[in-house]
Image (spheres, rainbow, N blue to C red):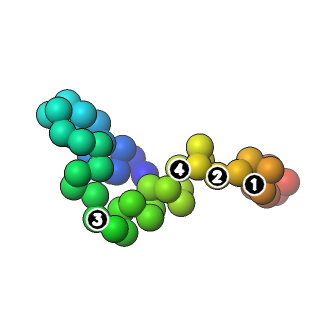
Amino acid sequence: MPALQNRLDEAEKKGQTAFHDFTDADMIKWFLYERRHLNAENDRSLYL
């Protein structure tokens, strides 16, 4: 999600709120794919 991270960084530089230009779909992607929002106990990728 580097594109979304870049948008967050740009908003911070401009003094805007973090998610001011995120769409609903962007918000869903951000929270689903950010690893810090996931429960590590449910991560099965370690077992591949």
Label 4: element kind: loop
Q: What residue do we see at 71% from left, 51% from top?
A: 39
Circle 3 SS class: loop
Secondary structure under badge 1? loop
Element type where label 2 sits in the image: loop
- Kindly identify the amino acid type of the residue bearing the numbered disc 1: Asp
Residue 40 screen position, x and y as percent: 74, 47
10 Å crowding of disc 2: few (<14), some (14-19), many (20+): few
Q: Position of residue 6 (x, y in %)?
A: 30, 42
Residue pointed to by mark 3: 23
Do tag 1 and tag 2 residues touch (Cβ < 8 Å)?
yes
Name the residue that disc number 2 marks: 38
Label 4 vs label 3: CA separation? 16 Å
Front-most of residues 43 and 23: 23
In this rendering, position of residue 11 left or right of residue 33: left
Q: Position of residue 43 (x, y in %)?
A: 75, 54
Q: Dividing the picture into quarters, in which one does residue 10 lie? A: top left
Of label 1 and label 4, which has the lower sequence position? 4
Residue pictured at 34% horizontal, 68% vertical: 24
Residue linked to disc 4: 34
Residue 13 is tagged as: none
Q: Which residue is mark 1?
A: 43
User: Mark 3 is on which residue type?
Assistant: Thr
- Within 10 Å of disc 4 (Cα), the crowding (few <14, some 14-19, many 20+) is few
